Structures are given as C-alpha cells and as structure tokens.
Amino acid sequence: MRQMVRKPLPKKAADYLKGKQALIDGGERTDIENLWKAARATKSIGEVLRALHTMCGPRERCMYCLDSHGCDIEHFRPKAAYPGHAFQWPNLLLCCTECGRFKGDRFPTNAHDQALLIDPTHENPWDHLDFDPETGNLVARFDLIADDWSIKGTQTVETLQLDRREALRVVYQTTFRRLARILRDALDHPAGWPVGTLCERLKETDDHGLLPWCFGDIGRTVEPFCTLRAHDPETWAACEAALR
C-alpha cells in the first residue's frame, strides 16, 4: 500500500459532483444506489475515474492492494450508510474487483465514527502496517505508545484480508526481493552507485509501495538495508530522504 496525493478534479467534474451531492443533502433524492448508478454512466464520472487513474500512476493499480488493476470507483465511506459522502471527491478511491468484494459495505469505525480503515489518500499506510519479508504478508504494525497492535492496521488487514491472499503475498515478497537485489548489487560495486541512480532503480522496481517500509524504522534493521545504513550512512540518509 502506498500513500497517494489527492489531485484536484477538472472543474466540470467537480461541479457535477457538487450538484449531485446538493440533491442528496437537500433531501430531494434518497435512492442513493440508483442515483449513483445513473451518474456512473455519465462523462463527468468518467472524468472522475480518469483522475483516480492518474493519481495511481501509469499502471493504474488498486489504491488498497497496489497489485490488481483499479477498475472502478470505490466509496471509502459506503454511500448507502453515508449518503452525505456519496459524491464527495475526498471520499472516492480506486479499487480492484477483489478488494471491492472484500470491503463491500464494511467500514469499521470507533465510538466517534472515525474511520478505522486506512485511507491511502489521507495518511501514510506504513504508520499502521508492517511487512514480513519472510512470508510476504502485510500485517498490523505494533504501536509502541499504545503497547498494542495498530487498530487501523488490524482493521484494514482484516477487512481487505491482506494477510490471507496468496497471490498478494507472492507479489509483495517478489518486489521486496528485487529491491534487496538492487541494493546488494550497489553495495557490491567497487565504486558504489551514484545516489540518484540507486534511488531511480529502486523506484522503478517498487511495484507495491514497499520503499517507505524498507527505509523506515523496521526495514532499516533488515538485510541488506541495515548494511547500507551501517557502511554508508551518507548514502542511506540521501535514500531515506528521497524514498520514504
């Protein structure tokens, strides 16, 4: 999972969403599902989908798993339970069929109705998630302050079944191994690699948003990242600044 930058919509699409949301907020339309179904076929919502694809980069991957193609618009807060967010741009994400099926209308919250699901356009997922290089699984991060597993991480992993999807485990583990191989090649080179070249190669290879973990508090203790940090702290600092 990777943090995404929420980009502004084209004015026409933004105005369209605003108009539809006004209908709901004014109580004129309460059949949210039919309203969304009709809107989904319009050019304006097509622009919304294109904007989400652009946010995800050229491979247009799901914002939740970063593996499968993001094929449809996802309501972070489900539109049926939260009609006040149905046409709000900040509530719209891009997800794949599998993540959409697992999430469905599930939306864990706390007693104050605050989301317990990670929104990758609003926060850094690695504040709540951890990665296990041995298994390839995404798991909840341990919160030292709370002395417990991150509740957001736990709820996100459970809702999207991030630790139970064999294909997802394999691709995350493969990406980590490729990143580690690049770093080992750089470390083994007699003259080393220029920092810019190293960072570019790592970014090109990071299909699943693992670099913030690799250069974070936990990844820095794992080989070969710990070796780079110990033997070349200057390069480590430059990579950390560029890749976290």
Image: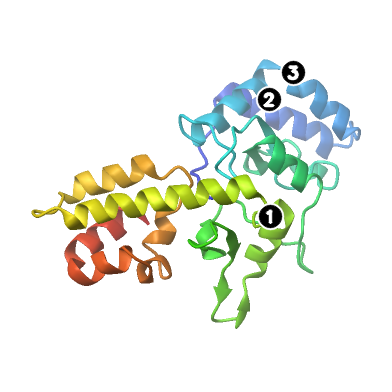
The type of residue carrying mark 2 is: Tyr
Q: Nearer the viewer, residue 111 or 4?
A: 4
Q: Which of label 1 and label 3 is nearer to you?
A: 1
The type of residue carrying mark 3 is: Ala
Which residue is located at x 80 percent, y 29 percent?
Answer: 36
* Label annotation for residue 164: 1
Residue 94, placed above or below residue 141: above
Quadrant for residue 66, please give it: top right
Looking at the image, residue 166 sits to the left or right of residue 125; the answer is right
Which label's residue is closer to the chain start, 1 or 3? 3
Q: Quadrant of the C terminus?
A: bottom left
Residue 161, placed above or below residue 87: below
Q: Is residue 2 visible?
A: no
Which residue is located at x 70 percent, y 51 percent?
Answer: 160
* Label annotation for residue 151: none
At mark 3, the secondary structure is loop
The type of residue carrying mark 1 is: Arg
At mark 2, the secondary structure is helix
Which residue is located at x 57 percent, y 64 percent?
Answer: 128
At mark 1, the secondary structure is loop
Residue assigned mark 2:
16
Instruction: Determine the CA span between mark 1 and mark 2.
Output: 39 Å
Residue 16 place in picture, x, y as percent: 68, 25
